[in-house]
Image (spheres, coloured by chain):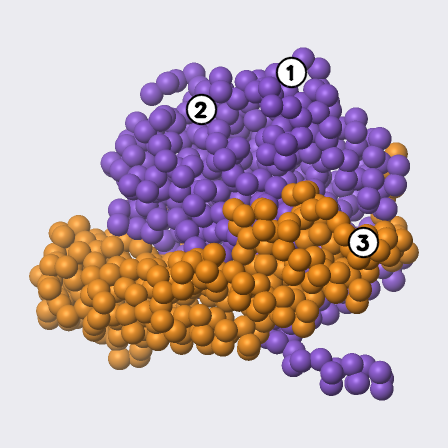
Amino acid sequence: MAESEQHSSAMPEITESQGKQWAVENDVFQIYRFFSSSSREDQDALLKLRRDNHIEYLNKGLRQLPASFCTLDANRPWLCYWIVHSLALLGESIDDADLEDNAIDFLSRCQDQNGGYGGGPGQLPHLATTYAAVNSLITIGGEKALSSINREKLYKFLLRMKVASGGFSMHDGGEVDVRACYTAISVASVLNIMDDDLVQDVGNFVLSCQTYEGGIAGEPGAEAHGGYSFCGLATLALINEVQRLDLPRFIDWLVFRQGVEGGFQGRTNKLVDGCYSFWQGGAFPLLQRLGSVVNEQLGIGTEEHTSISTEGVDSPDLSEDDPDHEGTSSQADKHFHPKGKGQTSDRSKVSLSDIGAEFLERNMDIPPLLQSAVLQDYILLCCQVPQGGLKDKPREHRDFYHTCYCLSGLSVCQHIWSKSLDSPPLPWAIRGPYSNLLEPIHPLYNVILDKYHEAHDFFSASEL
Amino acid sequence: MEEEWIPFRRRVEWSDVNPVPQDEGPNPIVPIAYKDEFVEVMDYFRAVYLADERSSRSLSLTAEAIRCNAGNYTVWHFRRLVLEALHLNLLHELDYLEHVAGDNPKNYQIWHHRRWVAGKIGADATVKELDFTRKVLSLDAKNYHAWSHRQWALQALGGWEGELDYCHHLLKKDVFNNSAWNQRYFVVTKSPFLGGLTAMRASEVCYTIEAIETNPENESPWRYLCGLYKDDTESWVTDPQVTSAIIKVLYMKANHVFALSTLLDLLCHGLKPNEALKRRTFHTNARGIEYTYDKFPFAKPTKYELPSPI
């Protein structure tokens, strides 16, 4: 006691950042202490994903929301996406066909006659709600949903939102930031309506937002931030310009965002938040497939390397330093070079419309650079509301946004050690019972992989 | 809504307008149980919006709609059209926004609108914008929108003179405030009065190293330090101040993660370690594994068993 008092008197006053951080650590560690002192049986129960309760919470939201949701009246396609995507991650499709039709009908009413989707019927088309509506329709799937999207007009809307800097404006006269770039480019890519006019200078805008810390900000000069970093990285990957980003710096910033709580913070010295399980965690499956670019930037490999093939290129074997996975490094090695032989894909030859599909086929020459087990623990033990739904952190309340992005992050963790997204993960990759397993996502768009493939087939069959 | 709120259908000045209900279909999904007032305000809003009526009553109607949902960007967009048509004194609009922003400090639309208004006013808005963001940041020193707005105001309107002092003031209050470090970087690199990174580096390095040595566990100054040498790898790896700061911190704690990470970065960029550094890192190496447990105490197998791979 005396020692700690002496210690604290010698220390400067505790700052607001420290105080808040310690309060959260206290909450989180209390949960973990309780967990570690529980019996094996109880631990299994605590780690269990409350699937049925989450499904019930989500289904209710789809059917009725209280008046307090008025503040989200301009985000209804988002509400739809958060719920429908969460259900899809849980392996549920919307149970009755009527509800599916109702969803398609409602989103059609949000579609502007000149292209794009607004936050509700009759509202101005907006890039973010367009992304949410398109991803919702892809997740619902089927001819009726997919053909309800007016791609010609959507393309024109995207082009209208383009600004001189190369970025996009969220809506007519709206804000220009990295979110706008991602939502525009993601939609254009998945709908197979991407072209050089849309892509022109987008890369320049995103690059101008990479900060001295290594992460990406919303606008040039602002602070590196998890949400914008995912958006920026995914945008560059989708337009095949990710090699222009300083990836070693980006990775260095990113890996430090996972904290002692197991979860991710959005910015340096900010608090952990379950939603960054996806916004930060979701960057790792992208980085896994960018090994050759990282190696090039680090000067590893050779100058004559013009292809993405990583045959013979050393990948950093970080798992050796991980004491908890002793003996996994050889296992891991097998996983990282599943398609090492004979696979080359010349970056310059990849057409914009194929990137989404081609990306999945790439070699995974970088191991998962996140601690996937402790992130799963954070999501399952600290973010789950037993009655259904997930949340930011202990003491917070559940909502659909956090439910969506906690589950998306959980899915990423579960599948990140698999050699390909099509094969089921090994039991050791899943925290809790194997029944916690969620559907895999396409990491560039955050839609369920199966649904992505269906949409890809559907839209590649019809050029604009 | 206040209690004395009078429905539009009972207001004489609105008797000529036919409200337009929302067309959400017979069985909408994610349906919101709107309150009556909300429905009525929005029905009247849709009427003037569709009629493109840019009048002063439309302006006050948008304020009511914003009170219902400050996130409705369509309403804000229309409000800008009306403001432009009416040629009103936009300084009043800033006062209005200050009032609205109080309850919604993280609302994209309000900040975007504010940027539009201040941009229209120009240099006369400088002091107001800097004061306003200062006020918001005094309540939440990391408000992302407030910082973006402040950076925009500095670049578009000016007012750089006191900004470095402001950063120092915030860092003195909370040296862990990474937003303030980011702002400091912004000022040092962009201010027209400071001569840029090259002119500022020496004094900034001293400032930063002092912050590191006081709180080595604070990641922000470590990242800032590295940022000060952006695009000048040569100086980064050869500046003896950087390595001596690392040695000093490693001396206090042999496995200090930020010191080691910075050292690793230097080595990757060609640092030739001197004797002092070699001695220091030998100690670190001996205790290497503890670093992992420092960062992830709950990854320790003794706490609970991680499933072992097959």
Give the class, few, some or many, for how many residues have Cα within 10 Å of label 2's Cα (few <14, many ≥20): some
Picture colour for chain B: orange
Q: Do the residues marked 2 and 1 share a common chain?
A: yes
Query: Three-letter amino acid code at disc 1?
Result: Gln
**Tag 1 or tag 2, which sits nearer the N-term?**
1
Query: Three-letter amino acid code at disc 3?
Result: Glu
Q: Position of residue B25 (x, y in %)?
A: 33, 44
- Secondary structure at badge 3 equals helix
Q: Position of residue B302 (x, y in %)?
A: 90, 56
Q: Do the residues marked 3 and 1 share a common chain?
A: no
Q: Is residue A303 left or right of residue A198?
A: right
From this viewpoint, is residue B221 visible? yes
- Secondary structure at badge 2 equals helix
Q: Are marks 3 and 1 in contact (CB under 8 Å)?
A: no
Residue drawn at point x = 85 percent, y = 46 percent: A324
Query: Marks 2/1: CA distance?
Result: 19 Å
Residue drawn at point x = 54 percent, y = 48 percent: B232
The residue singled out by tag 2 in the image is A352
- The residue lying toward the viewer, choosing from A340 and B8, is A340
Residue drawn at point x = 81 percent, y = 54 percent: B275
Picture colour for chain A: purple
Quadrant location of residue A31?
bottom right
Nearer the camera: disc 3 or disc 2: 3
From this viewpoint, is residue A216 visible? no
The residue singled out by tag 1 in the image is A343
Give the class, few, some or many, for how many residues have Cα within 10 Å of label 1's Cα (few <14, many ≥20): some
Q: Position of residue A148 (x, y in %)?
A: 37, 30
- The residue lying toward the viewer, choosing from B154 and A367, is B154
Image height of B238 relative to A393, above or below: above
Q: Which mark is residue B275?
A: 3
- The residue lying toward the viewer, choosing from B291 and A328, is B291
